Amino acid sequence: MAEKTATEASNDFWLEFKAEKQAIEDELNNLKTLPKTELSTQFNKILQQINNLEKRLTKATAFIPSYDERQFSIQLKELSETLERNKAELTPKAKFSFKSRKKKPSAPETNNALTASEAPSAGTDGDILSEATVLFKDKQDAVLTLKDANSSSENNKSIDILISNVKNCVVILQEDGIQISAVHIKNIENSVVYCGKIEGSILMYGLKNSVLFAGCHQFRMHEAHNVDMMLHVTSRPIIEDSNNIQVCEWNTINQTSTNYFDQIEDFNWLKKQASPNWKVMDQEKNQMLDEHIKTFQQDIDRDAALSVGLTLLPTPCGKSK
């Protein structure tokens, strides 16, 4: 039997982690229904489950992307904090006991401009922002490029990108001399995202009525609806809780590697028949995207990019042009 590739092993671990995390959450939610005499035993059991999952994560760091590792760690921390809160609520300490509390550091203020964080920190949406993370956040009706963030990112030749809460925008992630390790998308609507070539992974939660141009090694999409994609991916893409996805081939970005753009795995569709949630794009739409792609490449005209981008957007579900 052939050994798993790093991508396959990463996907398997993600499924296992998700299932185990849900089991722990179920145990936590059930605590308030238990007699007080059973709480101590159950607390220890849950703590052991969290510790075991943490050990498995440590072993998995050999093959999972660094961004995924950080997100798994955040979720483990949240489980531990939830357990501690339940302990405090369900088995309170004696009334007159003394307790020292460390003051939690205040969250760093962020403005709405494009920024690269100066030190590792936790974003308001739970993401870990490293010193090499460029952040596009809370933007509307604009063209966003890496050149806009160049003053922050010029010292980092390899960066991660986090795009969060963006609407009616064109986002262009391409600049000479800058290598993008990973792109993470949260809550994007009515926008065009031109990723270009990404060395590692693209991970998204929440993409609606948008167009995506992307070349990457690993592609994972959650909660996406009504999205057109021109894609080059060197492992099988994954979608979950998504529908009305249309995809076409982007071969000019990398002509030497296999493109798995049309071998999408839908985690919500386990039948042998093809998933109804995605399909290969028809030739007419494919050609339209191909004809306009240069608008988002080198030496862009911002007004033209925004105007063309909005015309390429798929029709919102339930509406007609």
Image (cartoon, grey):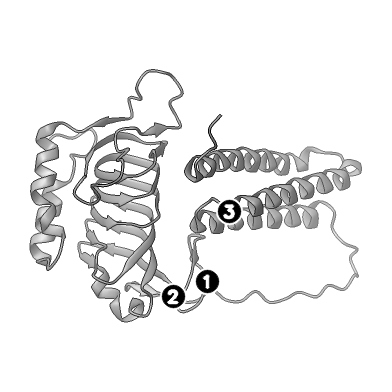
Marks 3 and 2 in Cβ contact (< 8 Å): no
Q: Nearer the viewer, mark 1 or mark 3?
A: 3
Q: Nearer the viewer, mark 3 or mark 2?
A: 3
Give SS at disc 1. Answer: strand
Marks 1 and 3 in Cβ contact (< 8 Å): no
The residue labelled by disc 3 is: 62
What residue is rendered at 25% in x and 49% in y? 212
Give SS at disc 3. Answer: loop
Mark 1 or mark 3, earlier in chain: 3
Identify which amino acid the numbered label 2 is placed on: Ser
Tag of residue 163: none
Position of 177 compared to 21: left or right? left
Residue 257 position by quadrant: top left
Q: Residues within 10 Å of mark 1 (few under 14, many from 20)?
A: some
The residue labelled by disc 2 is: 117
> How far across and down, in percent of the image, does residue 197 sit?
28, 56
> How far across and down, in percent of the image, does residue 299 sit?
12, 68
The residue labelled by disc 1 is: 121
